[in-house]
Amino acid sequence: MSATTATTAPDVVAQRVAEQVLDGHVRSATRLITQSQDGDPLARRVMSLLYPHCGRARLIGITGPPGAGKSTLVAGMIGELRKRGLTVGVIAVDPSSPFSGGAVLGDRDRMTGFSSDGEVFIRSMASRGAIGGLCAVANDAVDVMDAMGKDVVLIETVGVGQSEVEIAQIANTVVLTLVPGYGDELQAMKAGIMEAADIIVVNKADSPGANGAVAELQNMGYFQAVPQGEEMWQVPVVKMSALRNEGFDELEAQILRQSEFAEKTGWKAARQRRRRVHQFAEVVTDGVRRDFMGVMQEGGGFNGLLDRIEALQVDPYAAAQGISRRLRTLTKDL
Amino acid sequence: MSATTATTAPDVVAQRVAEQVLDGHVRSATRLITQSQDGDPLARRVMSLLYPHCGRARLIGITGPPGAGKSTLVAGMIGELRKRGLTVGVIAVDPSSPFSGGAVLGDRDRMTGFSSDGEVFIRSMASRGAIGGLCAVANDAVDVMDAMGKDVVLIETVGVGQSEVEIAQIANTVVLTLVPGYGDELQAMKAGIMEAADIIVVNKADSPGANGAVAELQNMGYFQAVPQGEEMWQVPVVKMSALRNEGFDELEAQILRQSEFAEKTGWKAARQRRRRVHQFAEVVTDGVRRDFMGVMQEGGGFNGLLDRIEALQVDPYAAAQGISRRLRTLTKDL
């Protein structure tokens, strides 16, 4: 009986935290995101309780190279959404974003003008930790904001690394932000980010070459194929000046149009499923990686093998093959 | 008998390719790196044959924020090393590097002045593919250049993403390149890159604030602790102007000093072991991730579970827990 009581206690705490988050308490949500980043078991229990309450928020990814004005765009979008009475969550994974400055040197969030508005919840993600960890952490933060009842969650990432591209793909709609003279920038980014874009914004439309850039991108004609369907989404190009507050109506209209298209064609459901499939696979394999590293660092099992790898007698791939094959069989059986 | 013959054939091919690479054939090496990026099984066999010939090259990582002049530094280092009669390999993972421009829009390598020099082999890495994949691909490219007989392999990465930091850590010596007024840049990068630096270069030393930046970094006093040892490496700060060809002697001297220190204290061996441990763990878990994704996409085993995840009935972490636990037990037993 006492064992039951002992195991019940953390669940009572988890339940209380979950209720606070569902009620929209910013402090509880902030603490939960931090704890989930730290891999706190209590946070995991709270996340499980929140999960059935997710899936209501509209998730919009804002990506693009450094200097494309993503943060100004995000700030403008917050303003527009608030005017419509919608509540907003912002997750800044872009380390160069003013929104996420705090995450690098500490844990303060700079609200850049929205600090007094209780309906805007901004959270920056520190990018440290394991590979793959950043995407897991962003997934959790999105779920927390969704469960809090935010109508829209904006996910700002710098479209440079593969993990940033994957984070953008958590969103229902991915907005790629470019500026005139974007050619060099595109070179400097993965081609992957073009494939992830649902809408392209040419920002700083008042600078020279803006019309040319828009025309060029339109002529290139980017498309997104709906999986298992025959329909195609032609990626629209929106000319904007976020700084001068121009073009937000058109962007909003295109986001709505894409949302309706995605809903109707089953694209939205397919993307959500893909998000969860990825998340699930990442969580499982992250556990395997951790265990592997743990076993190896403890000096268990693999040391003889590692000695041979280090002595250049067996290469890491050959050494991994036998182990991988056995794990594979197991995976299929599960 | 015919079955034996059939399985022998690819090994004969692998043997021939390995010999060509060991002889320093640039074409064979280029093709091998591409094939290994594509996961070609033949490339895997060749890599196994090359592995015993690795471990001779000096591996130097050049990292830093965009705009710090890494490419100019790399170009200068190539020139200095060639003057000393050393052969050089360059792996550019930085997508904004002129060395890697080709990887994004195609597969051409821009040799930027060294194209006529047969002793300099430059290879840029496209950053597409799975998370973790980039580090695996960089590891392979380093091994190929090492086996080719390059005396020095320079690994240029932009110190922005976690995977770039891990790639820099393949090196025996990591050179972090900053410029005066680096404060904002440091904010924009992970703190992780500071922890990875063995030598800090303040580049563009002719610009205002250079002396202040050097003094500040020296006062901060960065140290690297040798694992399982009591010795510490104080990170030296080198003032340079790569563009004006100033400071290369001092950089070379510091790299040599760090190499000798690392050799003497066992730090080098510990780092090499860590590199291979990571590589091994990545290869194994990458296999698990692939199988997982494969099984899920084929519609085997997990579909019921995924349906429940999608319907927000079970969260991905809870779903993963049981599977993770079983895999963990297996991992320990191996």
Image (cartoon, coloured by chain):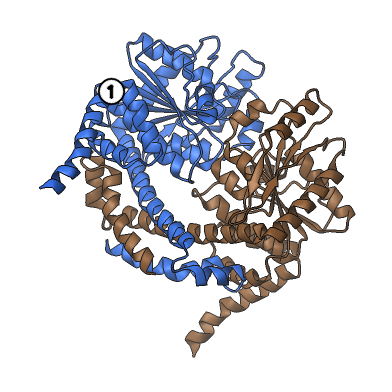
Chain colours: A blue, B brown
Mark 1: few/some/many CA within 10 Å (<14, 14-19, 20+): many
Q: Position of residue B37 (x, y in %)?
A: 57, 56
Between B203 and B232, the one nearer to me in the picture: B232
Q: In this view, does B329 lie to the left or right of A168?
A: left
Q: Where is residue A241 in the image (x, y as percent from the top left)?
A: 55, 14
Between B281 and A258, the one nearer to me in the picture: B281
Is the residue B53 above or below the residue B204 in the image?
below
Is the residue A53 above or below the residue B194 in the image?
above
Q: Where is residue A235 in the image (x, y as percent from the top left)?
A: 47, 30
Quarter of the rendering containing residue A168: top left
Is the residue B234 above or below the residue B140 in the image?
above
The residue drawn where x is 26% and y is 48% is B319
Between A163 and B168, the one nearer to me in the picture: B168
For label 1, the SS is: loop
Q: Which amino acid does label 1 sit on?
A: Gly
The residue drawn where x is 66% and y is 49% is B107
Is the residue B322 above or below the residue B234 in the image?
below
Q: Residue furthest right?
A: B83
Residue designated by label 1: A149
The residue drawn where x is 66% and y is 43% is B223
The reply to whether residue A58 is visible in this rendering is no
Q: Is residue A221 left or right of residue A79?
A: right
Q: Where is residue A158 in the image (x, y as percent from the top left)?
A: 54, 31
The residue drawn where x is 69% and y is 28% is B182
Q: Which residue lies furthest to the bottom in this view?
A: B1
Say which chain tag 1 marks: A
Please identify the quadrant where the C terminus of chain A is shown.
bottom left
